Image (cartoon, rainbow, N blue to C red):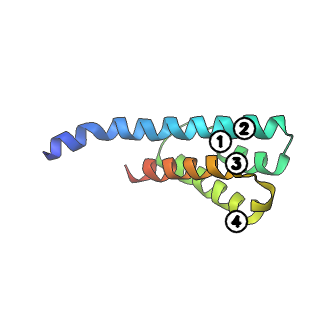
């Protein structure tokens, strides 16, 4: 594989990672609004929606979600934790690209 082949795919990979972040965050937002869970919503709304998607914003979102897991894991169900882990993986991908 040539270096130019890898370089041409980077924007697509970054776009996919950002799309995955958006889907996860939208689903988390819906879940937490429906159940009126204010603390997780506050963490999410601290960094999302990302008005200017990019590595810096993805890193900020990642930090907010990691803090939520660290300080309020007991308020999250398994579905929440799964979506958060998926969003964190996508954010990590977006910051690496």
Helix, strand or loop at mark 4: helix
Residue under label 1, please give it: 48
Helix, strand or loop at mark 2: helix
Q: Where is residue 43 in the image (x, y as percent from the top left)?
A: 73, 51
Q: Is residue 72 visible?
A: yes
Q: Position of residue 95 (x, y in %)?
A: 44, 52
What residue appears at the point 58 percent right and 35 percent down from the top-left corner? 23
Chain-order first, disc 2 or disc 1: 2
In front: 43, or 26? 26
Chain-order first, disc 2 or disc 3: 2
Gap between marks 1 and 3 measured at Cα: 16 Å
Q: Residues at badges 3 and 4 in contact (C-beta under 8 Å)?
A: no
Chain-order first, disc 3 or disc 4: 4
Quadrant showing the N terminus: top left
Q: Can residue 51 be seen in this view?
A: no
User: Which label sits on residue 80?
Assistant: 3
């Amino acid at each position: 594989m040539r270096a130019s082949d890898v370089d041409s795919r980077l924007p697509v990979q970054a776009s996919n990672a950002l799309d995955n972040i958006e889907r996860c965050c939208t689903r988390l937002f819906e879940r937490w609004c429906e159940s009126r869970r204010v603390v997780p919503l506050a963490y999410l709304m601290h960094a999302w929606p990302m008005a200017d998607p990019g590595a810096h914003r993805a890193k900020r979102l990642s930090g907010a979600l990691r803090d939520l897991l660290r300080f309020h894991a007991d308020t999250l169900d398994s579905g929440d934790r799964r979506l958060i882990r998926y969003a964190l993986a996508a954010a990590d991908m977006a910051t690496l690209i």
